[in-house]
Amino acid sequence: MEIREHLLDGKTVLYLSGSISGIESIQLARMLEDYRKNDCGRLVIDMKEVQFIDSTALGGFIYLSKMMEKAGICLELHTPPIHLQELFTDCSLESILYITSGENIIT
């Protein structure tokens, strides 16, 4: 997994690429802890270049979403590839994870 961090219109966007396993989701959780402490309000994770998520990492995203929600921060998973959208749908995760799509990351 590779993570690139950018500020776009004053909002933090994390661009993820590659495969995400349980180990990488732990690294991501540690990184997101700083955003939770800084009360950023909204954090966008662009997923369009993510090729694979294992079951442990999928559980990690659910945990991260709930952790950020408790802190009053919206964790937005933006533009996951079709195969990941289908996985989220098959696992009925649309009600748990905030998933968006489209060209505009920040609206």
Image (cartoon, rainbow, N blue to C red):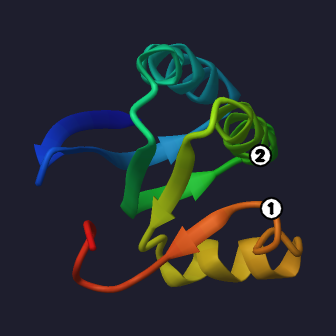
Q: Is residue 56 left or right of residue 45?
A: right
Q: Residue at x 82, y 71 (%)?
A: 95
Which residue has dot 1 on it? 96
Q: Residue at x 55, y 41 (%)?
A: 73
Quarter of the image holding residue 70? top right
Disc nearer the start of the sequence (1/2):
2
Identify the secondary structure beneath mark 2: helix
Q: Label for residue 82?
A: none
Q: Are marks 1 and 2 in contact (CB under 8 Å)?
A: yes
Image quadrant containing the C terminus: bottom left
Residue 62's disc is: 2
Q: Height in image: 16 above or below 87?
A: above
Q: CA distance from mark 1 to mark 2?
A: 7 Å
Residue 101 figure quarter: bottom left
Residue 81 image offset from top left, x and y in percent = 47, 76
Residue at image position (63%, 65%) is 98
In the image, 30 versus 68, the foreground residue is: 68
| Residue 2, above or below 104 | above
* Residue type pointed to by label 1: Ile
Amino acid at the residue labelled 2: Ile
Q: Residues within 10 Å of mark 2 (few under 14, many from 20)?
A: few
